[in-house]
Image: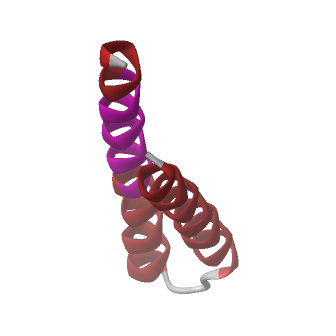
């Protein structure tokens, strides 16, 4: 379970970093790319969080 929590934290950190990069990007295509990456990593984090919740409810 700790490994899943660590991965969840990592995904959230990466999403925040992509959001930061998107905000600083001067090129529109790069800004959109990093914004999409940030959103994708948030979706992945939500899926991991859901899996953690399901595992936790079984214990």
**Residue 4 lies in the magenta stretch:** no
The residue depicted at 45 percent of the width and 60 percent of the height is 7
The residue depicted at 43 percent of the width and 81 percent of the height is 30
* Relative image position of residue 6 (x, y in whole percent): 53, 59
In-image side of 36 versus 25 (left or right): left
The residue depicted at 54 percent of the width and 65 percent of the height is 10
Chosen colour scheme: secondary structure
The residue depicted at 54 percent of the width and 69 percent of the height is 14
Camera-side residue: 28 or 18? 18
- Callout count: 0
**43 above or below 19?**
above
Instruction: Write the start and end of the magenta stretch as one range.
Output: 41-53
The quadrant the C terminus occupies is: top left
Camera-side residue: 49 or 33? 49
Residue pushed farthest top? 57
**59 above or below 5?**
above
Residue pushed farthest front? 59
**Residue 44 lies in the magenta stretch:** yes
């Amino acid at each position: 379970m700790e490994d899943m929590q660590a991965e969840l934290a990592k995904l959230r950190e990466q999403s925040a970093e992509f959001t930061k990069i998107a905000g600083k990007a001067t090129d529109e295509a790069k800004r959109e790319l990093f914004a999409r990456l940030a959103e994708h990593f948030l979706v992945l984090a939500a899926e991991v969080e859901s899996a953690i919740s399901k595992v936790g409810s079984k214990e």
